[in-house]
Image (spheres, coloured by chain):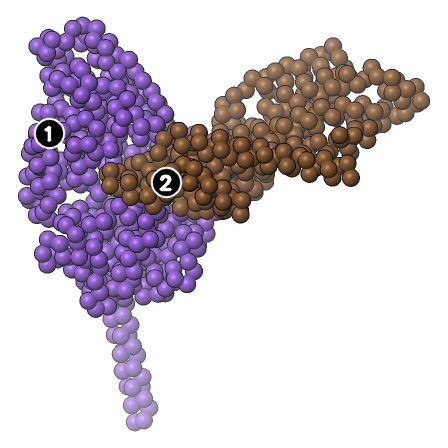
Chain colours: A purple, B brown
Amino acid sequence: MARSWSRLLGAATSASLLVAGLAVGSVAQAAHHRPAGVKTGGTLVIGESSADVGNWDPVATYEIPWATVMNNVFEGLTFRNPQLQLQPGLATSWKYLNPTTLQFQLRKGVTFQDGEPFNATAVQYTFNRLLGPAGAKGPEQGNYTSIKSVQVVNPYEVIFHLRAPDPSLLTKLSGYGAVIVPPQYIQKHGAAYFADHPIGTGPFMVTKYVRGSEIVLTRYPHYWRGPAYLQTVIYKFLPEDSTRLADLQTGAINVMQAVPIPDVPLLKSNPAYTTYVAVTPTVYEFGFDVTQPPVNNVLVRRAINMAINVPAIIKAVLKGYAKPISSYQGPLSFGNDPNLKPIPYDPAKAKALLKQAGVKAGTPITIGYDGTDTTFQEVAQAAASYLDAVGFKVTLMPVEQNTFYNQDIPDQKAGQMFEFGWGGWTLDFDNTAYLLYMPKQFYNPSFSNPEVSKLILAERSTNNVAARRQDFYKLDTLLQQLEPGVNLYDTEEIWATSSNVQNFVAPPDDRLWLWHTWVK
Amino acid sequence: MRIVAYVVRRILQGALVMLVLSIVVFVTIRLTGNPVAGLLQGLSPTKQAIAHLEHALGLDRPLYVQYAAYMWQAVRGNLGQSYSMQVPVTTLIWSRFPATLELALAAIVESILIAVPLGTYAALHRGSTGDLAVRGASLIGISFPNFWLGIMLVLVFSVTWRIFPASGDAGLLSLVLPATTLGLILAGVEMRLVRASVLEVVPQDYVRTARAKGSPPARVLTTHILRNALLSIVTFTGLQFAGLLGGVVIIEDIFAWPGLGQIGLTAVEQRDYPLVQGIVLFFAALLVLVNLLTDLSYLLIDPRIRFE
């Protein structure tokens, strides 16, 4: 009898343990279900196209390449996924209590990579630091000055008090200066140490940094979404295109950023590699100095727009790796009107407009451009030939990049037409529109229109998405009529990986996200 | 005592050179444009943001105030903070300089190992086929653009034959291609110099005397010919070494070699005033030191030399 009871007890205990184990397992699986066939572990070696940014502190960086690395180490209250959808990040929800008061509920059970807990104190510390003396000498502070203060309501609730409505704030909170930093770690080790040994809440942690050479990330096993598949990610700083390509071909790297267009066929034709094309936020135009003749006449500006065959330039110079644009923003930008078409190529109409405007054959026009940009040099040469064909006498003026953008354009010495390349990571037209079309801005010394200004001020004074969209669509149409520039194209960036790299997503905004990338 | 006085005088002269250079660099870099708009270019360069950052960086102060503040810190070893990286300039220099030094030294050693034997051979077999070959090789070496040679070496030895890495600083194998790129071009120039120096020494009386006394040919070569030919070679090598330290930019860029040249190029492009100033002053100090050491080395080579 005793034996049968003990056997029964044993069976009952085993059954209970089995049920408990299944329950735990199913919870774990629900939290982080790994599809069949996915291999964990492994190392990804990425050849970055930029030089070492030199400082990994979020308040100190102004470089987009910073985020190519740190998007896997730090997180913000909101999260913008590789499909550019804004989702909860370290905040589980948010709501506007009024246009200048934004409440966040914070995620529980999250830790920084040194074990420090994430909570409202960390959020308040992050923004006090960003907006205070520590952030004053860095370029990020200016991006977040709409935030007046951050109030801690309880350990998992904060309220942002704003100076004025900031409709792109939720996107800006997903990266760069707004990523959440560990207060205890920084207070213990200091900012200089933190700059070389950054700690965040993301899926990977920095385990080695060799200045000028590489940065090594290792999987953070307690990441709140579940551990990443990869064990190690190494970023090598390889700004020279031919070296980066050589490293991919020798196997020294298995991901290559920014494949030069002429090298794409070499990689595409080889089954050992996979290429990916990402539409970027970077757009190019020829800006006009609307104070200088003959482009001070809107008819002439329209004629120039119609004289340049942008699709042909994209095909011949960029080998198809770009898209024509109808306003000075890419298709992914909030504010882009998908129904607005680019101005069509029509050289006959262009000539008629020039005649109507009284522009004689042989009228000189100067096109300034960044002399270090070898691709745009070809674009400028092609555009010059189109303008020659309708009767202009074009002079091309290449200038060193920094001088061109930060002296010649603001000082109106870049010619009647000038290259302008721009890419905003917020993917909201507000930033571009304000800087290029509001009067007397740094990059806009000449264009001014009261109706344009009114629309820009209207869209940035509200958080209402539908109202902003309508304002932007009106703005897009109006700008196309006023022609402050020749909208050229939105660029595409090409990445290449060795074919054993799986689930790699080429980021449209250079913010690589490697949580579920793996190596076969 | 004479040597000590000479060294002290050279150091003081060097300090004066550095002071003048600091003013020249300070002024000229500021003529190339304001860095702040460039720093904010990818973000939001509104006029307010630019003015705010200019103030934070002290760029709205009068030039003489900025210079005085900079030099006050510089003489204490603080070269300021890089605008673009927000990291102390001294940290950047000390972390990157060893790689540049390693590359420059390797290039010099490689060039000497090539140039001295070949240049000597050419001089001792003047007019022969070997001499012609060496002079031809020297001309080819001088003619190579260094960026082209570097890329070609990568293509052949990394991509095709997989012998050496194409990039990075991961051990001795990584050093071979960048050092060879620089070394081959340098060797092209040095070969001609060695040949000319040896040709000048060979007909001298003391060489004929040494041979007449029955000294072994190897001893005649090393003790009498090369030692006397070495002065001009040492002078040239010293100058080249100093020049290399500042001139490896392109090679560091091609091979992703994490040296000071690479960061210097970026600093100029970004108008990173403190970093440009710091690197220039650092190289100037190095040049003064290398020239002094070169001059002092003459004493070892030729005991007849006296310093005034």
Tag count: 2
* Residue that protrudes farthest toward the bottom in the picture: A1
* Residue that protrudes farthest toward the right in the picture: B213
Q: Nearer the viewer, residue A119 or A489?
A: A119
Q: Quick one: SS at disc 1? A: loop
- The residue carrying mark 1 is A449
| Whole-percent x, y for residue A493 in the image | 29, 34
Residue at 74% x, 26% y is B231
Q: Quick one: SS at disc 2? A: loop
The answer to whether one can see residue B60 in this image is: yes
User: In the picture shown, does residue B126 fall above or below A126?
Assistant: above
Q: Quadrant of residue B237?
A: top right
The answer to whether one can see residue A237 in this image is: no
- The residue carrying mark 2 is B61
Q: Quadrant of residue A350?
A: top left
Q: Residues within 10 Å of mark 1 (few under 14, many from 20)?
A: few
Q: Tell me the distance, in whole angstroms, between the alpha carbons under discs 2 and 1.
A: 35 Å
